[in-house]
Amino acid sequence: MRNMLRSIGGVIARISDEYPGRILLIISIVTVIATGIASGLETKTNVQDMLPENSPAVQSYIEVTERFGEANTLIVLEGERDRMVEAAEVLIPRLEALELIYNVQGTLPMDYFIDNALMLTEEKDLDRTLERLGDPSLTGFLRGINDDFEREYTDSEENMREDEVAIAQSMQGIERSLEILAARFAGAEYATIEEAVDAMVTGDPWNLSLDRGMMLIICTPVHSMMEFNYILDLTVDVRELLEEIRPQFPEVEIGLSGNGPLQKDEMDAMTTSTMLLMVVAMVLIYLLLARNFGGWILPLVALTPLVIGIVWTSAALEIVYGSLNMFTIMFSIILLGLGIDFAIHLITRFYEEMSSGHSVRESLIYTITGTGVGVLAGGLTTAAAFLALLVGETKGISELGFTCGAGLFLTLVAVFFTLPPLLVLRSRRMERKGRKVTVPGAREGWPLLGKVAETSWQRWGLFLALFVAVMGISLWAGMKNE
């Protein structure tokens, strides 16, 4: 096996020395194609996408959502009650016209409720309801409500706590009915007497908070959260519609909430933060390498194959899964942290061989067939450890295993086929300028590390005791995690 790796390393060293420009051109073309493929990669923050597909509970949940849909788009209005109603009456028809919305509910289904209310009432509450409705006159109805409340709640604080929301809602209906009657008595064409009667009996038809300062419009999408692209499109469409409606009702605050908008906001935030963290990680790695290598070019040489590996991995994920989840979205930072070691080991060994007087090709051969074999073995074993997660039942964990395992393999390929040509071109450039080849990092740059290593050799017992103490504290803290 080792002889085979040495043979492959010799071939890579030879073609990198003879055709560095052609190799980099091929890699650039592949990377451009991979970039185009990876451009369709999206992020899904839905927890359901990370659950085991074979779980009966998950399958039942998916079946229910596919049959009945999910109320995952909520429009919230705040303001004075009548102005919110005016805004809702304009907004609801526009929402119903959207192709991605299955149903819009801004009011209770009053016709259905009036026709079937007694059949939906529990047996223990049916007698109470019949007594309350015994006298159909206004005074009789109000007296029935008063008598019912006295019987049920005067001496029962427990009943009061259980039914306090229902009590408040019934009072809200009475208040709405009295508002209509007062307006009608004043001669205003505010609402019909029929609406006043309905409000008195069934409550305010709109989905209002108890203080009537907030209204809720519930939109059920055509597609479930499993079809995430459509949910994102729906969120964009609704937001555009709200931006158009808001100027018509400046005194009403109109907001968007629900599972769909929340998932999109989380996706945008996670994507932005991940990109920012990756940029920060690359800058920190660059500065650290520039400090250690004593130059600004070699850090770019070291980071280039890592960026290429990340692009290739993104394309692979688009082909295999089509999206990232909350576990795999950080894969780029993981690949940066693990992959930079590959580049550092190879670069350092290459310039050690060059400083010893070997030619570029010889240095590449010694680097790839020597240090490169260890780098390859370490990278492949780490990739295999990640790929072992594929056997997990949880979809999110298995995707993480494939992402990091395949990503490390592709990063290894990028390092071994991109780094040698770049080193060849840089070495030839240095030769043309007559610059002396030195070993990166060979200058005295980290004396503290040397002192720590020397002290650990001289006082190994103390360091061993510190190691055992730290391990003990870590185990104790880990056992307390829930």
Image (cartoon, helix red, strand yellow):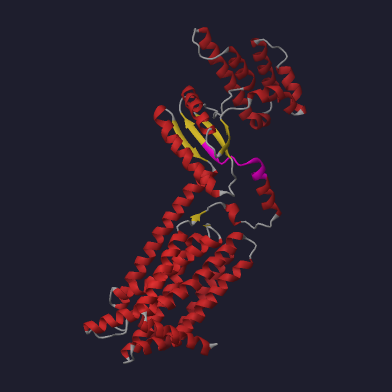
Res 150 → quadrant? top right
The answer to whether residue 455 of the structure is visible from this angle is no
Q: How many marks?
A: 0
Position of residue 75 measured from the top left corner of the image (x, y, whole percent): 51, 35
Residue at x 37% of width, y 90% of height = 362
> Does residue 16 belong to the magenta stretch?
no
Q: Is residue 430 left or right of residue 267?
A: left
Position of residue 316 measured from the top left corner of the image (x, y, whole percent): 51, 65
* Foreground residue among 299 and 414: 414
Res 10 → quadrant? bottom left
Position of residue 235 measured from the top left corner of the image (x, y, whole percent): 49, 42
Q: Is residue 40 left or right of residue 67?
A: left
Q: Is residue 428 left or right of residue 76?
A: left
Q: Which residues are magenta?
A: 64-74
* Foreground residue among 41 and 443: 41
Res 125 → quadrant? top right
Q: Is residue 68 left or right of residue 266?
A: right
Which quarter shows the N terminus? Answer: bottom right
Q: Residue furthest left?
A: 433
* Foreground residue among 250 and 380: 380
> Does residue 73 belong to the magenta stretch?
yes
Q: Residue furthest bottom?
A: 357
Name above or below for residue 154 compared with residue 43: above
Residue at x 45% of width, y 39% of height = 239
Position of residue 342 measured from the top left corner of the image (x, y, whole percent): 43, 77
Name above or below for residue 412 compared with residue 83: below
* Foreground residue among 140 and 190: 190
Which quarter shows the C terminus? Answer: bottom right
Residue at x 48% of width, y 57% of height = 41
The answer to whether residue 43 of the structure is visible from this angle is yes
